Each structure stands twice: as structure tokens, then as C-alpha cells.
Image (cartoon, rainbow, N blue to C red):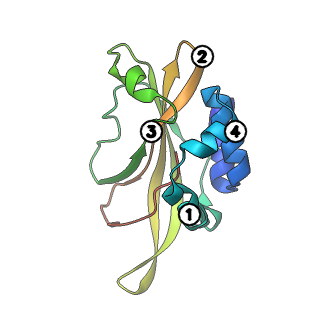
Amino acid sequence: MQLFEERLSLLIDPDFNKYIEHVARLTGRGQAQVRASLSDRFVERWDIDTRIFKEASFAVDSCLLSRGDTARMQVGGTVLAKRDPGVYGTDALLANPEAILADIRIPIMMAVTMNGEGSTLLLELVMGFVWNETRGTWVPHVVAFHDPSSEIERLPVPWI
């Protein structure tokens, strides 16, 4: 639960340096190594992609924790996702048919402009984790927006 709280805190109040510290702790690598592993585009897009969360309204009075397969998010609607780009090493973990997965879904209201008009969308922020037995911790493998209504076509997806 501490990992979830840290990641949610970083989404609500994104701080790039805290993100680097967080990833370094989860991966067992130094902060310099983590910074070097991130693409220039990732670093350049940080402020743009995180601005949307500073303006969003989170409803955390209900969330669903589910263990299951990696297709858990495919429940209809539109899913915009980012998967682990290799930072956390989840490919090998997910290749194991006995992998333990957890999806945490949080209702989120987001103000967007669609067709030149302001609108509010009700989405689910989905954070997917896989258990890393070797390190004794959960690690993120996917982060996504799930739009049950399929109204969104483009939206910056949160960092993973």
C-alpha cells in the first residue's frame, strides 16, 4: 500500500526529482543511472504531461484492487496506456505465467477541450503492478486512462 500511496502522491503533485528518487529505490539503481536511462523526450515532456494531473479532480473514496491477468483493463471503452519501457524490468516478470498482478483503479474527473468546447470526463486512472519476488516489492508495469464512454481520442498518459 505504501507504493500505491507514493505513486498517487507523485501523480497529484508531480515532482521530477522525487520521481527519480522513487524509481531509483524501486529498481535498486542510483539516481544518476535512472536519469541516464530516461529518454530526452521523456524529460522534455514531463511538465507538459504532468500539468493535467495538477488540474484534475481525484475521487479516492472508492478504488478497485484486483489480481488477475494483464488484460484486466480490457473491459470496453478506450484504454490509453504506457507500459514499462524497461526501467523496472517487468517484461521478464510478466513472462512468468505465475506472475502476481494488481490493478488499482481510481475514478478521476478531468476537464478537457473537445471539438473546441470545454467538457468534463469521468475516467479511471489505472495503475498496474507486478510482484517482484527477488526484490520483495511491487513494481509498476502499466499506467493508463480507461474511458468507459470512448469519448477520448488523445490525452497525455501519466508517466510510469
Q: Do the residues labelled 4 and 2 touch (CB within 8 Å)?
A: no
Q: Do the residues labelled 1 and 2 touch (CB within 8 Å)?
A: no
Q: Quadrant of the N terminus?
A: top right
Q: How crowded is mark 3: few (under 14 residues within 10 Å), some or many (20 or more)?
A: some
Q: How crowded is mark 4: few (under 14 residues within 10 Å), some or many (20 or more)?
A: some
Sequence order check, earlier mark of 3 and 2: 3
Q: Do the residues labelled 1 and 4 touch (CB within 8 Å)?
A: no
Sequence order check, earlier mark of 4 and 2: 4
- Report the amino acid beneath label 3: Asp
Which residue is drawn at the image coordinates 30% and 61% (left, top)? Answer: 150
Q: Where is residue 109 in the image (x, y as percent from the top left)?
A: 52, 62
**Which disc number belongs to residue 31?**
4
Q: Horizontal placement of 138 versus 2: left or right?
A: left
Q: Position of residue 160 (x, y in %)?
A: 52, 45
- Report the amino acid beneath label 2: Arg
Residue where numbered disc 1 is placed: 44
Q: Where is residue 24 in the image (x, y as percent from the top left)?
A: 66, 34
Q: Horizontal placement of 78 versus 88: left or right?
A: left
